Amino acid sequence: MEFTDRLSALATKVKNQADAIATEEATKNAFVMPFISTILGYDVFDPLEVIPEYTADVGVKKGEKVDYAIVRDGEVQILIECKASLGQLKIEHASQLFRYFSVTNARLAVLTNGVVWKFYTDLDAPNRMDAKPFLVLDLMDIDETLIPEIQKLSKDSFDLHSIISAAEELKYVGALKREIAAQFRDPSDEWIKFFTSRVYEGAFTQRVREQFTSLVGKASRQFLTESVNDRLKTALGATTLVSNEAPVTSEPVVELDLDRDTEIETTLEELEGYQIVKAIACGEVKPNRITQRDAKSYFAVLLDDNNRKPVARLHFNSKQKYLGLLDADKNETRHAIESLDEIYQYADEIREAVRRYS
């Protein structure tokens, strides 16, 4: 099995089991040890490769332990500290990693709850672990650009020099991506003022601030919509459609009427869910026949832009997400999903809904 496939398989396991793992020990057994063995390729039962409960006396601190130390050529290379999967990772949880980092040869440290993996090194000061990670891997939402960097940590491909060389760029690019995403979700005053000053020549008064808060948010959503359109049209253009279908046209893949109701906020997650449903439905009809309409209570995916031909409904406005599917009598059944990838589990039902109307 390829590295990416192994990572995807573990991510699926994490998504299915995370809510049932309540303790740190269970997290280690269910998620951390499989990551060390199947993803990184180290033998968790060989103390020459993986040392559990690793102890190194630090000053007056005696007998403190780090959960795992990964050894290569007789030297500790990676330190791993674990927390329960249901808990949030905080820098306070890394106190032992900070202390051990300075008294071992390790250049890499990992803080994890089995779901999120934060990787640290010593970019800011030699032999002193940075306060911020250079790489954050979330198994609930894997950033595919990070997979080659994770692979460099594996036993077969371990390349410490390459990892450290790339760490600074990874650290700041990752932090910038997270900050940009936060600004798209909830623009700060600084973000609003920055863009307003580029397009508005008047004074930045309170009235202008209030006006452009809405406009910047709307422009951000439209920009994301257009980006999703471009990606989807590129993907669909490279896909062989049903033999009797015409080629993909240049018509818009997503058309958002953001002026329809100012209280409706179309999220990137809804657009990505729509993209998945559309890709599934396109096995039955032309892509431009699958459309969407957002409403206050749900995001509807329709055939022929017709409310009487619902393909699916995305209920993403609460913490628990649901995929709504309707039978021939328009009775809706909501299916709880934890991640967008789970929509693919209902591909047959989505295609059947399209066939009923077409």
Image (cartoon, rainbow, N blue to C red):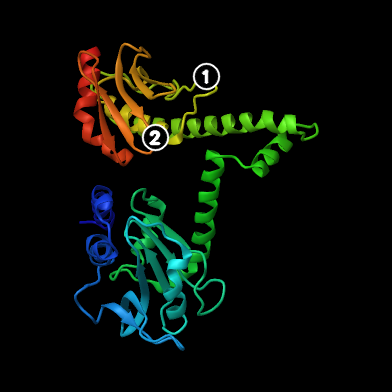
**Which residue sits at x=31%, y=29%?**
277
- Quadrant occupied by the N terminus: bottom left
**Which residue sits at x=52%, y=24%?**
263
Res 146 quadrant in image: bottom left
Res 156 quadrant in image: bottom left
Q: Amino acid at mark 1?
A: Asp
User: Callout 1: 10 Å neighbours few (<14), some, many (20+)?
Assistant: few
Q: Which residue is mark 2?
A: 318
Expressed as whole percent of the image width and height from the top left, the position of residue 198 reads 72, 37
Q: Secondary structure at mark 1?
A: loop
Residue 105 in the figure: left or right of residue 54: right
Residue 203 in the figure: left or right of residue 174: right
Q: Which mark is residue 261?
A: 1
Q: In the image, which is nearer the foreground, mark 2 or mark 1?
A: 2
User: Callout 2: 10 Å neighbours few (<14), some, many (20+)?
Assistant: few
Q: Are marks 2 and 1 in contact (CB under 8 Å)?
A: no
2 or 1: tag closer to the N-terminus: 1
Q: Does residue 358 appear in the picture of this structure?
A: no
Closer-to-camera residue (247/129): 129
Residue 294 in the figure: left or right of residue 84: right
**Which residue sits at x=28%, y=50%?**
19
Considering only vertical position in the picture, is 74 above or below 189?
below
Q: Amino acid at mark 2?
A: Ser
Closer-to-camera residue (146/129): 129
Q: Secondary structure at mark 2?
A: loop
**Which residue sits at x=57%, y=43%?**
183
Considering only vertical position in the picture, is 273 above or below 130?
above
Closer-to-camera residue (262/251): 262
Expressed as whole percent of the image width and height from the top left, the position of residue 5 reads 25, 53
